[in-house]
Amino acid sequence: MRLIFHGPPGVGKGTQAGRISIEQGLSHISSGDLLRAAVDAKTEVGLKAREYIENGLLVPDELIVNIVADKINSAECEKGFILDGFPRNLSQAKVLDSTLGKTGKKIDRVFSFIASEEVIITRIAGRRMCESCGAHYHELFSPPSKENVCDECQSKLFQRKDDYPETIKVRLKVYKEQTEKLIDYYNNKGILEEVDCNGDKAEIQQNIIAGLHSMSKEERDME
Ligand code: ATP
Ligand code: MG
């Protein structure tokens, strides 16, 4: 099964991709995580990507498409994958199609995550991460027991620079201008499924699982 989780920043794609990939035995490919790892490791890609990321802009395609293509073609993705954060524009979507097409594969389903702008901004603005172990917290929804201190390892929490309020606005604008149009692209292929993401994590997960089940039924019907 090859899936894409599509939607605006902060809508919860990463959280759900983490849960569903474990449950379904799929590989989770987060382009944002791959890029942040490159930034931390100060690789050539990381050094070039850093400023774009911190300013809430998309990194140029050439910095990300090869990294994602290598992942998709690797043994760990043999059983299938969930793409989270990729593709972000039409040209990335086309590269993805041709990369998969070379080995006779295709994307089976695209889950389009829908939430109000208010929900999105609240989710992003409260997000905090541990600077040492990377554990995730949220000021309102999953606060640490001691303010700004990680429950797991007692290190300090920090806020991603691209989660600052002014940068959130840029990311939402970039989403509307470049990424939202992929909804039409995948809808025209007949593989788009909308997921209501205004509820809590467990509810959203149930909505996706229901979508996956309807998908296997449709596939059974086609046989
Ligand atoms: P969230 O943090 O909630 O997952 P997001 O989806 O906007 O929201 P990431 O996917 O982690 O965040 O991406 C963070 C940044 O990494 C983006 O703002 C962009 O600069 C860069 N990035 C990630 N994926 C891509 C991509 N496919 N193409 C170009 N830039 C990307
Ligand atoms: Mg993400």
Image (spheres, grey):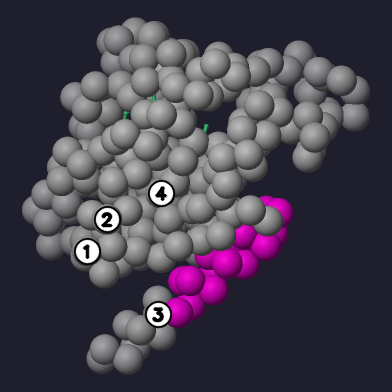
Residue on which the image places disc 3:
216
Residue on which the image places disc 2:
184
Give the image location of residue 42, x and y in percent: 39, 9
Give the image location of residue 144, x and y in percent: 84, 29
Residue 15 is tagged as none
Which stretch is magenta? 200-214
Label 1: few (<14), some or many (≥20) within 10 Å? few
Residues at badges 3 and 4 in contact (C-beta under 8 Å)?
no
Q: CA distance from mark 1 to mark 3?
A: 20 Å
The relative height of residue 9 versus residue 79 in the rendered view (above or below) is above
Mark 3 or 2 closer to N-term?
A: 2
Q: CA distance from mark 4 to mark 2?
A: 12 Å
Looking at this view, name the residue that lies furthest to the right: 146
At label 2, which amino acid type do we have? Asp
Write the residue at 33% across / 24% down: 58
- Magenta span: predominant SS is helix
At label 4, which amino acid type do we have? His
Residue on which the image places disc 1:
188
Q: CA distance from mark 3 to mark 2?
A: 23 Å
* Residue 86 visible here: no
Mark 4 or 2 closer to N-term?
A: 4
Residue on which the image places disc 4:
6
Residues at badges 1 and 2 in contact (C-beta under 8 Å)?
yes
At label 3, which amino acid type do we have? Ser
